[in-house]
Amino acid sequence: MDRIKIRHRPGHTTGTAHFSNSSLDDTAIWFQGNPGFQKVVVIRLEHTVTIDLKQHLSTRAARIEAVLTSLLDGAALPGETARPPRLVAAMRHGALNGGKRLRPVLMIETAAMFGRSDDGVVQAACALELVHCYSLVHDDLPAMDDDDLRRGLPTVHKAYDEASAILAGDSLLTLAFDVVAEETVHEDAGVRLRLSRDLARASGLGGMAGGQMLDLESEHRARSEDEIRLLQSMKTGALLRYACRAGAVLADAAEDDIDRLTRFGEVIGLAFQLADDLLDVEASPETMGKATGKDAEAGKATLVGLWGIEKTRAELNRLVKEAAELLKPFDERAEVLAALASYIVSRTN
């Protein structure tokens, strides 16, 4: 696996690293990555350690998983009457089945870049992940993509039944707005309201759900590049854009910086979808943990189908460069986000 190349800039040889479980005061030399890198070298004042990006993501994902597990406990909260055990079990099946947790990680890392890294950020990130998990549960239903496997396990409607899967998705979605409204997310109720409103718009008829509708309508129909970009920016890109935007909002970033991170989210959202479409063409079901080749089978419009593989890879490279340019003003503080952008393009599942 490739290693980060270390270089020193005159007058600026050290900076602050914002890595997960360590203190935000760890000191790191400035470093530059490439699209295939997996490791970064961090220099502390006392000693040198090597951080594996894959392990870093795994650590973040474990923290997110722990909070999700707590949120999906069977005990009723104040104001709830009861939590039916079968519904809780179906929700847990749909949400606690592993995964990269990319969306919540992006939110956590964006907030950390602006200096905030606490339990409230993780809480908000888990609200986003609950929305994402709801979308997967419903997306797998026979009336939608009709998938039997998700992350190598039976989908919720296969493990339980269709009615339970529908209710599990409904409950995951509504729970998300309960979670993001908690005071621990941000002391300012206005900020929590902004996060809730943005999440609703990213996930609803003008965002993810609307994009799914456009995607269903595109089956066995010719679509232009602009039409495909629109549906993908909604279906996949909306929640990734929200992840980066919300991270900046949580950390009270300046509005110009919030706008910049919103655009960064848009760019990596498109990159994620392009990479996903390539994997659907090239990867095996065993590697992906789900069926592949389904876009072509369903006659869905994709940019890979429109452009071909080579042009798609060229566009991915362009998007990575744009993402890097958007992060330039944040210097070494943005190294983890830059690494994540590269990971999105080079991932194998």
Image: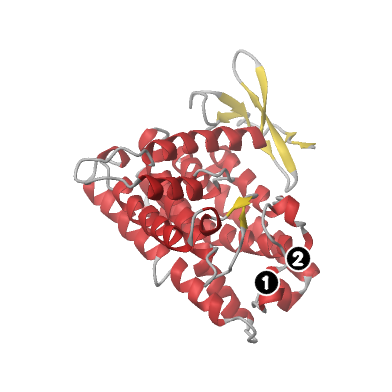
Question: Which of the two residues, 255 or 219, is positioned nearer the viewer here?
Answer: 219
Q: Which residue sits furthest top? A: 46
Q: Is residue 241 left or right of residue 127?
A: right
Tell me the amino acid under the disc marked 1: Asp
Residue 279, placed above or below residue 306: above
Residue holding disc 2: 281
The residues tagged by marks 2 and 1 sit, at their Cα atoms, a distance apart of 8 Å
The residue at 20%/41% (across/down) is 78
Q: Is residue 347 left or right of residue 154?
A: right
Residue 267, placed above or below residue 257: below
Q: Looking at the picture, how far across and down is residue 306, in whole percent?
A: 72, 78
Q: Quadrant of residue 185?
A: top left
Q: Is residue 248 visible?
A: no
Evaluate if marks 2 and 1 touch, with contact meaning CB atoms under 8 Å apart. yes
Sequence-wise, which precedes: disc 2 or disc 1? 2
Q: Looking at the picture, how far across and down is residue 331, in whole percent?
A: 57, 41
- Label 2 crowding class (10 Å Cα cut-off): few <14, some 14-19, many 20+? some
Q: Quadrant of residue 229?
A: bottom right
Q: Which residue sits furthest bottom? A: 222
Question: Which of the two residues, 114 or 63, is positioned nearer the viewer here?
Answer: 63
Question: Which of the two residues, 15 or 276, is positioned nearer the viewer here?
Answer: 276
- Label 1 crowding class (10 Å Cα cut-off): few <14, some 14-19, many 20+? some
Q: Is residue 183 left or right of residue 207?
A: left
Residue holding disc 1: 295
The residue at 31%/45% (across/down) is 83
Tell me the amino acid under the disc marked 2: Val
Residue 132, placed above or below residue 99: below
Q: Looking at the picture, how far across and down is residue 267, in whole percent?
A: 57, 61
SS state under label 1: helix
For residue 129, the mark is none
Q: Which corner quadrant holds the N terminus?
A: top right
Residue 291, placed above or below residue 115: below
